[in-house]
Image (cartoon, rainbow, N blue to C red):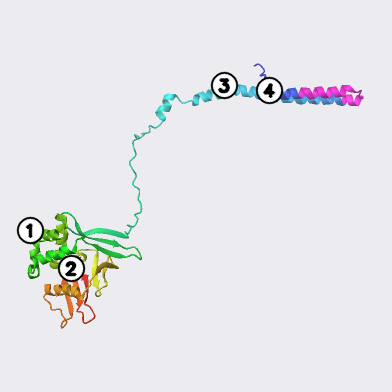
Amino acid sequence: MEEIKFLNNNLEEERQESIKELLRLLEEKPVSNEVFATRRFMISVMYAVKSIKERKTREEQIRQARLMPKILKKTEQNVIPEAAVEEAMPVLEIPEIGIPEPIELEVEEKPAEIKTKQEYGLIMSLNQTLAKAVVDLEIGKQKYQLIEPNIDSRVLLKTIDILGGKIKKDASILKNDKLLMKAVEKACKKYKIEFNNNYFENVKYYLYRDYLYFGRIDPLMWDKNISKIVCDGINRAVIVLFNNKKIETNIVFNSCEEVNNLLFKFAKLSNKVFNAASPILDTVINNFRVEATFGLEEISSRFSMTRVNK
């Protein structure tokens, strides 16, 4: 086998240069026999070291060259044919990629916001809202306002005058729309007020409220949010318990006669006596328990109404 040669051996070149430099130094000056002997000894050692290292290197290269065919053969034996590799590999079922379904995230529900201001209808006709509630629950501004139709009071009084004593005898005549419409139209004409269906419904609202139903507090009785109505006397705002909040309304009774007329109606409907001789009234009217005291001298009549069935 041919000796394996390397294209570049930097270590060998460095050794050669070192030997040449040493020989040059020794040849520059005359030396004694002892020095000359030393020179020859050093050169011999250098060549011996060089021969030993070159022999070991050459022996290692030869050994690697002899082993190479066996390594190659073993490697070839370990190569797995491509077909075998394909057979050995497990077949993976790859799911089809589509549009992912939306993920429903569980969002913590926020508590419902409490509206500080509300507005809703209480009494309505076929064409319009006749009475509505505007409630403000903001601290410091709590108020329950009843909004009713805007009409000329002269038209209302003239309509009552035209109908005469018929209303007092039997208030149910107000349900006769033809009769009522003629009276309202005549009153509007007298005061040069435009008459139309909406205005007629507005006047009719007040006639029904005061003669067929319960006057100023009647709309409050239609509001399911109200559980209690309290009147502590004349010229004082009526108080309501609105969703367990005690707030004032814009309703005020201006005379004892107005309060008493309402309480007399309650007593009549429940077949009870209510006057100075029997000053206590306790009855149930339209799902409200009515408790009232009759006014004496400068103290006006008072009442409270508590809803008993919502």
Tell me the quarter of the image containing the N terminus. top right
* Residue 31, position as x, y percentages in the image: 91, 24
Q: Distance between the residues labelled 4 and 3?
A: 18 Å
Secondary structure category for the residue under label 4: helix
Classed neighbour count for the residue bearing mark 3: other residues with Cα under 10 Å, few (<14), some (14–19), many (≥20): few
The residue under label 2 is which amino acid type? Gly
Stretch in magenta: 15-37
Secondary structure beneath disc 1? helix
Q: Mark 1 points at which residue?
A: 178
Count numbered badges in the picture: 4
Badges 4 and 3: C-beta atoms under 8 Å apart? no
Query: Mark 3 to mark 1: distance in Å?
Result: 126 Å
Residue 181: image location, x then y, percent: 10, 59
Category of crowding for the residue at label 1, using alpha-carbon neighbours closer than 10 angstroms: few (below 14), some (14–19), many (at least 20): few
Per the image, the residue denoted by label 2 is: 215
Q: Which residue lies furthest to the top in this view?
A: 2
Corner quadrant of residue 17: top right
Residue placed under numbered mark 4 in the picture: 58
Does residue 4 show up magenta in the picture?
A: no
User: Of helix, strand and loop, which mostly describes the magenta segment?
Assistant: helix
Q: Which of 17 and 255 is in front in this view?
A: 255
- Quick check: can you spot residue 144? yes
Q: Residue at x 69, y 24 (%)?
A: 57
- Closer to us: 2 or 239: 239
The 10 Å Cα crowd at callout 2, few under 14, some 14 to 19, many 20 or more, is some
Q: Is mark 3 in CB contact (under 8 Å) with mark 1?
A: no
Q: Nearer the viewer, mark 3 or mark 2?
A: 2
Q: Name the residue under label 3.
A: 69
